[in-house]
Amino acid sequence: MSEAMRIAVLGVSGRMGQMLVQAIGESERCMLCGATERAGHDWVGRDLGEAMGIAPRGVTVSDDPLEVFAGAEAVIDFTAPKATVAHAELAAQARAIHVIGTTGMEAEDLAKLEPAARHAVIVRAGNMSLGVNLLTLLTRRIAAALDPDYDIEVVEMHHRHKVDAPSGTALMLAEAAAEGRGVKLADVSDRGRDGQTGARRRGDIGMVALRGGDVTGEHDVIFAADGERIILRHVATDRMIFARGAVKAALWGRGRQPGQYDMIDVLGLRD
Ligand SMILES: NC(=O)C1=CN([C@@H]2O[C@H](COP(=O)(O)OP(=O)(O)OC[C@H]3O[C@@H](n4cnc5c(N)ncnc54)[C@H](OP(=O)(O)O)[C@@H]3O)[C@@H](O)[C@H]2O)C=CC1
Ligand SMILES: O=C(O)C1=N[C@H](C(=O)O)C[C@H](O)C1
């Protein structure tokens, strides 16, 4: 059996950071070797397990990503866009596999991942669950089969703490719908309806974001025509689906050529 993969978790105190610690602990194929938080965070310098209120883990939370990357084969990053861009540069220097779950990245942030991917394996997805990735494939197929008399709307709901909209998943689903229709999402996307909007433009793909309570993540893709609606739905009830997907991505990255990959590659679903 090959050696257990050494994985570090970035932004470890976050909702996803803590799930990732649990998901790494579940697998015999990997071990947690490091963890980071922002400088000044009260977990920095403490044993991770003790900070989490569980048994000591023998891993000290660091605010120095460079030191953490140097000791890791893979790093898993569910933090914030600017932090992720900086992490990508460090992952490239350390030749570490960089699994990115962070959403809300703008085009300029994504462009900065390209030079890093010349040296590191980057696996990035707005949603790391099997269910959502399958849903993107279904969305693409259905959009390809229907003409623009079927209006496409992507509706998402998340917890009150989420800071970006539309969600990374909603963007993945809208991209898949646009791809199925053979159009560019940027040309047809309608994200900000408010006031006197005028009638819906034929062929547009709408996106709507709801925020409230503790909703883990819910996404509907609606194909609405005269006389009928088709609704594809994914409901996440446990963040472990994302964390397990991210660990799977890190393990998949071992021995790959540098470049940018997504969960469709990891799950072997590319056609
Ligand atoms: N792809 C997927 O499957 C999923 C993606 N996500 C995405 O993951 C991201 C995180 O979500 P969530 O865990 O809910 O958010 P949280 O705010 O709970 O966690 C983010 C953590 O990252 C920390 N952080 C920010 N900047 C840095 C930095 N420079 N170095 C180290 N740590 C840093 C934050 O610290 P502080 O709070 O002090 O700023 C915080 O602890 C979001 O973009 C979310 O949309 C979430 C779930 C699934
Ligand atoms: O912030 C979240 O919580 C989630 N973010 C991802 C997204 O933006 O789609 C994935 C999941 O829906 C949870």
Image (tube, rainbow, N blue to C red):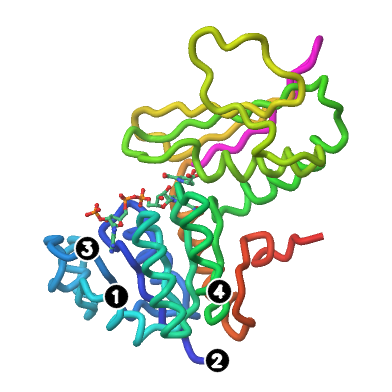
Going from N to C along the chain, the mark reached first, 3 or 2, is: 2
Q: In front: 233, or 255?
A: 255
Q: For label 3, count other residues whose C-alpha is less than 10 Å away and answer few (under 14), some (14-19) or many (20+).
A: some
**Which residue is at 67% across, 43% downward?**
175
Badge 3 marks a residue whose secondary structure is: loop
User: Is label 3 in contact with label 1 (beta carbons under 8 Å)?
Assistant: no
Mark 4 or mark 3, which has the lower sequence index? 3
* Mark 1 or 4, closer to the camera: 4
Disc assigned to residue 65:
1
**In the image, is the residue at mark 2 within 8 Å of ligand 1 by its beta carbon?**
no
Mark 2 vs 4: CB contact within 8 A? no
In the figure, residue 153 lies in which quadrant? top right
- Please tell me how crowded label 1 is: few (under 14), some (14-19), or many (20+) other residues with Cα within 10 Å: many
Ligand 1 contact, mark 3 (Cβ < 8 Å) = yes
* Marks 1 and 4 in Cβ contact (< 8 Å): no
Distance from label 4 to label 3 (Cα)?
24 Å
Q: Give the amino acid at mark 4.
A: Ala
- Mark 3 and mark 1: Cα distance apart in space: 9 Å
- The location of residue 186, given as percent across then percent down, is 64, 38
Of the residues under marks 1 and 4, which one precedes in the sequence? 1
Q: Pointer 3: what residue?
A: 38
Q: Quadrant of residue 124?
A: bottom right
Indicate yes or no whether the magenta region holds residue 133: no
